[in-house]
Image (cartoon, rainbow, N blue to C red):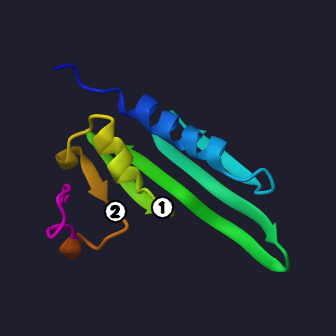
Amino acid sequence: MEKLNYPELVQKIIKLHVANLKDDEEVQLILDREHNHYLLMLVGWQEEQREYGSLIYIDIKGDKIWIQSDGTEVGVANELVEAGVPKQDIVLAFKSPFKRQFTEYAVC
């Protein structure tokens, strides 16, 4: 079986999330293809409340996809698995290294 193109797949998933956001939400899509950093930021104001932070932040290190931040309802890891990425190639980096051993995903 041919290995998936992880950078291409990650960008596709993030872009689908951009398309599903509300029109009044300001988003910034940051794709650093040279260093394999992929970031979807929410920026702006929700009434009188400042809105600023990453909705999705993913790095690709070696042969693993590191999910640094995931503010989605579905879960980017679930979307990656559904797209054919083996769980052992996904690191839930937002969890402490100790807690990762209790997940179905890579420990790294």
Find the residue positioned furthest to the bottom: 48
Name the residue furthest right.
Answer: 48
**What amino acid type should be assigned to the residue bearing mark 2?**
Ala
Residue 49: x and y in percent read 78, 79
Task: Give whichever of discs 1 and 2 has the lower sequence position.
Answer: 1
* Residue 94 at x, y percent in the picture: 37, 67
Residue at position x 33%, y 35% from top? 83
Regarding residue 71, the answer to whether it shows in the image is yes
Quadrant in which residue 1 is drawn = top left
Q: Which residue is mark 1?
A: 73
Query: Is residue 67 on the magenta stretch?
Result: no
What's under tag 1, amino acid-wise?
Glu
Residue 68 vs 3, above or below: the answer is below
Q: Is residue 6 left or right of residue 89?
A: right
Q: Is residue 101 magenta?
A: yes
| Residue in view at x 21 percent, y 74 percent | 99
Question: Circles 1 and 2: CB distance less than 8 Å?
Answer: no
Disc ID at residue 88? none
Percent coordinates x, y for residue 66 in the rendering: 35, 52
Q: Secondary structure at mark 1?
A: loop
At x 34% / y 43%, what residue is drawn? 80
Badge nearest the viewer, 1 or 2 = 1
Residue placed under numbered mark 2 in the picture: 93
Q: Which residues are magenta?
A: 100-108
- In this orientation, which residue lies closer to the viewer: 61 or 83? 83
Please give the name of the residue rendered at 42% of the width and 48% of the height, measured from the top-left corner: 59
Main secondary structure of the magenta stretch: loop
Q: Is residue 37 left or right of residue 96?
A: right
